């Protein structure tokens, strides 16, 4: 029988393209937030091996005080052989925040992002041999962070600061912190096209890639990241290179000195 | 005849009778229990809870000062909602049948002026920059207050102050005051000294046993304002949040907290910590016991850390 709900299902599958609405592994979402199945297929490509896993720690404040700068710490150091961490929100106009490829760094990342409404936030961790492990938490928010223009435009010198980088290494604690000036426009504010950093790569002096971050629109204005390393094997210097979607090159060097 | 209503009654069983007369989901009307306490000659205060906004406290977290004027009462800060203003109006008519003659807002934060609506026909005084800021930010504040307080906010519409207050020695409804135009908690904070009693009314430049809030703070300017207030050597200080201070501790406590907060964030930036890592670190005992902790410390990290970090971290290109 052709029912209204099956008609609806047809309509939805037409809109969503390859997403069928039923992933091949059906998980019991601890947050019951309603969108996870969809993201499991659309963001992660409907993997055959996936589970929710408390060992993936996602730490955020209960409430977003500043919708433009919600701090988040993702820690998957309890897992081994991590190749990729996809950080995403269930509810928001653009679900994906970034992909982190830890490489030689620890599978742990501190970041800030723009939130549009109260939502579950997830870190999906892909390991080399053991599929995907998903952790998450809930954040309450007044919202609006994704659909407002960047604050940078309140000052008239933002273009001069574009790509300006602050940061350094702390070898004793195995940290690398970097902040890059960039409006990170989502394209959702009226009349302002998407303008974002696409990727940031961390490499040693001899060109060896240590870690990489692929950014999406919800990363905060002036992206700020901490990467974590084993202090024993941490490089003494890191080149940070990146590019935005307008072709602007970003380049800087992090060292273990208080003043460059 | 089996009606849908009867069927529902069968399903609901024992509670059906109650359900038909008064719906189970109806909440009692929220009401504020505001009690003006006499503190000095011709001066009363209403003391707010030393908490953050919640649906339990209805946003009644602010201190209001009430001074006896010539034609009625001078109300300093009007609370968080229309309903709060109504409760104030009722309570204050028991002190003076003529009720409120004049309202003064110390600054533009919503817990200090969203009761103005009830007194919209009276002069509502504030510093010029406070009036401007209240106009600019009223919609955002209103959205957030409805979200935080729900039904407590019913019918509330922000009414920004409308009359610019004079500064220095002024007379308001026959009462002599000294108006100090300061800033630091927000861009524009008003402190008042009551000439008759010497009482210093600080707005949110001073907190006591309740964590200071920093969404619009300029810490350096705030410390300068505290130095100015300490020099007044007032016999009693009425802080924006927390109990009346007759022992001269509130200004020092606020200053000590702000100094610690700044030092903590500067040190964290020097160690490369992210905001979450700072939030996870414990507060020292003397500040952990303040009201609204650790929420306010966590909020302050969001307000202040990005800028502090930019100053501390070296350029990398």
Image (cartoon, rainbow, N blue to C red):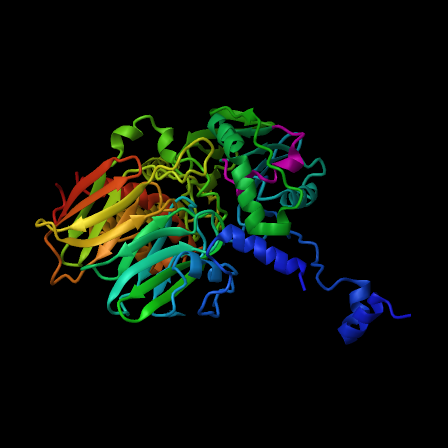
Q: Is residue B208 magenta?
A: no
The answer to whether residue B151 is above or below residue A76 is above
Q: Which residues are magenta?
A: B108-123
Does the rendering let one see residue A46? yes
What x and y, as percent, mark residue B202?
Answer: 46, 39
Question: In this view, which residue lies farthest toward the bottom?
Answer: B14
Q: Residue furthest left?
A: A206
User: Is residue A19 or residue B185 the one in the foreground?
Assistant: A19
Q: Residue at x 27, y 46 (%)?
A: A199
Count the marks: how many? 0
Residue A83: % across, % down = 26, 62
Say if residue B46 shows up in the picture: no
**In this rendering, would A171 be left or right of B104?**
left
Q: Position of residue B240 (x, y in %)?
A: 48, 44
Quarter of the image containing the C terminus of chain A? top left
Residue A191 vs residue A10: left or right? left
Which is nearer the eye, B70 or B192? B192
- Image height of A186 relative to B282, above or below: above
Residue B160 left/right relative to A234: right
Residue placed furthest toward the right: B1
User: Left of A61 or right of it: where is A180?
Assistant: left
Q: Residue A140 placed where, x, y %?
A: 48, 54
The quarter of the picture where the N terminus of chain A appears is: bottom right
B112 inside magenta stretch: yes
Residue nearer the viewer, A4 or A199: A4
> In which quarter of the view is residue B279 placed?
bottom left
Looking at the picture, tell me which residue is in the foreground, A15 or B87: A15
């Amino acid at each position: 029988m052709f029912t209204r709900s099956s008609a609806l299902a047809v309509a939805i599958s037409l809109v969503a393209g390859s997403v069928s609405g039923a992933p091949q592994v059906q998980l019991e979402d601890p947050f019951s937030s309603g969108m996870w199945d969809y993201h499991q297929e659309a963001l992660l490509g409907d993997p055959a091996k996936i589970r929710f896993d408390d060992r993936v720690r996602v730490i955020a404040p209960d409430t977003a005080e500043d919708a433009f700068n919600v701090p988040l710490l993702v820690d998957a150091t309890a897992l081994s052989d991590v190749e990729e961490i996809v950080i995403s929100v269930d509810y928001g106009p653009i679900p994906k925040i970034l992909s982190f490829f830890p490489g030689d760094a620890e599978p742990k990342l501190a970041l800030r992002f723009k939130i549009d409404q109260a939502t579950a936030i997830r870190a999906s961790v892909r390991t080399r041999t053991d599929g995907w492990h998903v952790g998450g938490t809930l954040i309450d928010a007044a919202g609006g962070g994704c659909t407002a223009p960047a604050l940078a435009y309140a000052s008239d010198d933002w273009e001069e600061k574009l790509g300006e980088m602050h940061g350094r290494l702390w070898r004793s604690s195995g940290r690398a912190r970097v902040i890059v000036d960039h409006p990170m426009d989502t394209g959702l504010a009226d009349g302002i096209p998407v303008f974002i950093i696409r990727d940031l790569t961390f490499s040693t002096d001899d060109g060896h890639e240590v870690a990489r971050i692929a950014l999406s629109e919800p990363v905060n204005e002036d992206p700020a990241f901490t990467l974590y390393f084993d202090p024993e094997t941490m490089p003494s210097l890191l080149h940070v290179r990146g590019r935005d979607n307008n072709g602007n090159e970003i380049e800087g060097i992090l060292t273990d000195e208080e003043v460059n | 005849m089996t009606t849908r209503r009867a069927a529902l009654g069968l399903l609901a069983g024992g509670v059906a009778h109650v359900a038909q007369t008064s719906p189970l989901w109806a909440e009692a009307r929220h009401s504020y229990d505001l009690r003006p306490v006499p503190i000095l000659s011709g001066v009363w205060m209403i003391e707010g809870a030393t908490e953050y906004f919640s649906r339990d406290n209805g946003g009644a977290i602010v201190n209001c000062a009430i001074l006896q004027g010539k034609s009625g009462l001078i109300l300093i800060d009007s609370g968080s909602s229309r309903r709060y203003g109504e409760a104030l109006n009722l309570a204050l008519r028991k002190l003076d049948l003529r009720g409120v003659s004049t309202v003064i807002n110390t600054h533009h934060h919503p817990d200090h002026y969203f009761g103005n609506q009830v007194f919209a026909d009276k002069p509502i005084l504030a510093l010029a920059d406070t009036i401007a800021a209240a106009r600019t930010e009223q919609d955002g504040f209103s959205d957030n207050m409805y979200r935080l307080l729900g039904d407590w906010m019913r019918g509330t519409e922000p009414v920004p102050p409308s009359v610019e207050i004079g500064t220095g020695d002024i007379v308001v409804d026959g009462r002599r005051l000294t108006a100090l135009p300061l800033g630091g908690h927000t861009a524009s904070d008003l402190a008042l000294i009551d000439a008759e009693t010497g009482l210093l009314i600080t707005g949110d430049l001073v907190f006591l046993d309740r964590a200071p809030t920093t969404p619009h703070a300029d810490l350096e300017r705030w410390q300068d304002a505290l130095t100015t207030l300490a020099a007044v050597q007032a016999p009693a200080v009425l802080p924006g949040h927390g109990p009346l201070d007759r022992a001269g501790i509130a200004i020092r406590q606020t200053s000590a907290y702000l100094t610690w907060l700044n030092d903590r964030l500067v040190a964290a930036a020097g160690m490369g910590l992210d905001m979450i890592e700072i939030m996870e670190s414990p507060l020292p005992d003397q500040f952990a016991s303040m009201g609204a902790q650790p929420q306010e410390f966590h909020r302050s990290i969001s307000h202040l850390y990005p800028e502090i970090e930019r100053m501390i971290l070296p350029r990398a290109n």
